[in-house]
Image (cartoon, helix red, strand yellow):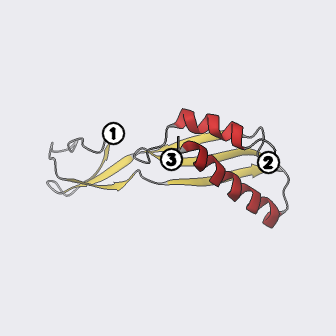
């Protein structure tokens, strides 16, 4: 379950930010996760709660913002939103697609005290 190591990385970012910006508590953390990032959201929510114990983010609300998968269709030259990597183009039905988004994962922002 790599979601545990993701949560540990988030904890490190939070602890470094707390030291650099002199805050003691995170109340809300918003995390953007792309559809193709390979992250199981329920597992990450569980890992977040466990890993944040004893940190400035203990008890913080985790809000996950879904980023859609996007691809460039070589058949119609349009950038389209797709559900799965191997989906055909929703505009023309073409199968020559190159992923252009949906793999990202980043902390969007935090509400702190």
Tell me the number on the disc at residue 33.
3
Q: Residue at x 79, y 48 (%)?
A: 55
User: Quick one: 41 or 80, which is closer to the camera?
Assistant: 41
Residue 44 image offset from top left, x and y in percent: 58, 39
Residue 83 image offset from top left, x and y in percent: 33, 39
Q: Residue at x 20, y 42 (%)?
A: 88
- Asked if 14 appears above or below 43 in the picture, the reply is below
- To which quarter of the image does residue 50 belong? top right
Foreground tag (2 vs 3): 2
Tell me the number on the disc at residue 55.
2
Residue under label 1, please give it.
Answer: 83
Give neighbour class at mark 3: few <14, some 14-19, many 20+ (Cα, 10 Å). many
- To which quarter of the image does residue 49 belong? top right
Alpha-carbon span between mark 1 and mark 2: 35 Å
Mark sitting earlier along the chain (1/3)? 3
Give neighbour class at mark 1: few <14, some 14-19, many 20+ (Cα, 10 Å). few
- Asked if 85 appears above or below 75 in the picture, the reply is above
- To which quarter of the image does residue 64 belong? top right
Q: Is residue 109 left or right of residue 20?
A: left
Mark sitting earlier along the chain (1/2)? 2
Tell me the number on the disc at residue 31.
none
Mark 1–mark 2 CB contact (< 8 Å): no
Q: Residue at x 19, y 58 (%)?
A: 77
Alpha-carbon span between mark 2 and mark 3: 22 Å
User: Quick one: 73 or 38, which is closer to the camera?
Assistant: 38
> What element does badge 1 sit on?
loop
Alpha-carbon span between mark 1 and mark 3: 14 Å
Q: Residue at x 53, y 45 (%)?
A: 2
């Amino acid at each position: 379950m790599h979601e545990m190591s993701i949560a540990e990385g988030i904890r490190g970012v939070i602890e470094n930010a707390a030291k650099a910006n002199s805050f003691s508590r995170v109340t809300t953390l918003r995390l953007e996760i792309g559809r193709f990032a390979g992250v199981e959201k329920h597992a990450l929510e569980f890992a977040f709660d466990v890993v944040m114990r004893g940190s400035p983010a203990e008890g913080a609300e985790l809000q996950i913002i879904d980023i859609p998968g996007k691809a460039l269709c070589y058949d119609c030259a349009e950038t389209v939103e797709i559900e799965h990597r191997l989906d055909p183009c929703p505009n023309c039905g073409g199968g020559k697609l190159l992923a252009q988004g949906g793999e990202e994962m980043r902390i969007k922002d935090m509400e702190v005290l």
